[in-house]
Image (tube, coloured by chain):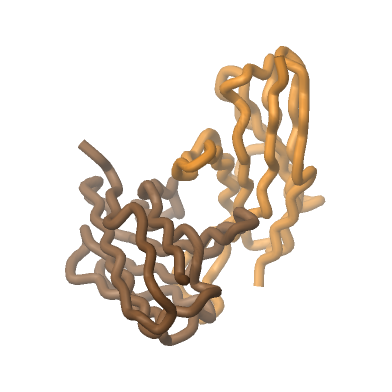
Chain colours: A brown, B orange
Amino acid sequence: DTAVSQTPKYLVTQMGNDKSIKCEQNLGHDTMYWYKQDSKKFLKIMFSYNNKELIINETVPNRFSPKSPDKAHLNLHINSLELGDSAVYFCASSLETLHINEQFFGPGTRLTVL
Amino acid sequence: GENVEQHPSTLSVQEGDSAVIKCTYSDSASNYFPWYKQELGKRPQLIIDIRSNVGEKKDQRIAVTLNKTAKHFSLHITETQPEDSAVYFCAANHKGITGGGNKLTFGTGTQLKVEL
């Protein structure tokens, strides 16, 4: 009965590879996000989608490409992985009606680039 | 863009004492201020939030105060317990850099340790 789920939980890969992380929410929310949390625990937004439309793209290298096939899913594809991409990536979702509301986070995907 | 500063970065208290974490923000248009708790290896989870139309909100041992004029807000935890040990993040909302959407900018986090 997980509200926001992500796969995989851990991802270890070599520099230069391409990888994807998947996210699904069953809360009926209309907005989904990707956050990056680095080794110092800084939590920074990368992308936001509302009803499958990209509405926030925060100076993220174009090696990162989000895709939202429907309102319940938001995937993140990363090309040509670099050492600096190592971090925990959190997906989140919320219901944005007239106001910004609570964001529910997924369990995170720990990406390690060797 | 929005800048959210959070202090202190680490806080150690004795069980039963109170803990206070403070944040400041820069965007006067911000109107939503959540606090998230993140235990080691877990996801951030909302513990309390406040909107700009109120100055204080309380939920059992947790309270948040907001001073819109000074652009600062604080988290207060009373009667701290060992299970309160975690990283706490404040956040404030504002528009994305392209002018669309409504996003949260998080503070840098406070590692709270409650000692027995």
Q: Is residue A96 visible?
A: no
Foreground residue, B80 or B63? Answer: B80
For residue B4, side relative to residue A37 (left or right) = right
Q: Is residue B64 above or below residue B61?
A: below
Q: Is residue B91 visible?
A: yes
For residue A46, side relative to residue A97 (left or right) = right
The percent coordinates of residue A54 (x first, y second) are 35, 76
Residue B110, located in which quarter of the rendered image? top right
The N terminus of chain B lies in quadrant:
bottom right
Foreground residue, A105 or B1? Answer: A105
Residue A17, located in which quarter of the rendered image? bottom left
Residue at the (72%, 20%) spot, across then down: B115
Residue at the (62%, 40%) spot, across then down: B88
Residue at the (28%, 49%) spot, across then down: A5
Q: Is residue B107 above or below residue A80?
A: above
For residue B39, side relative to residue A15 (left or right) = right
The C terminus of chain B lies in quadrant:
top right
The percent coordinates of residue A29 (x first, y second) are 28, 53
The percent coordinates of residue B21 (x first, y second) are 74, 38
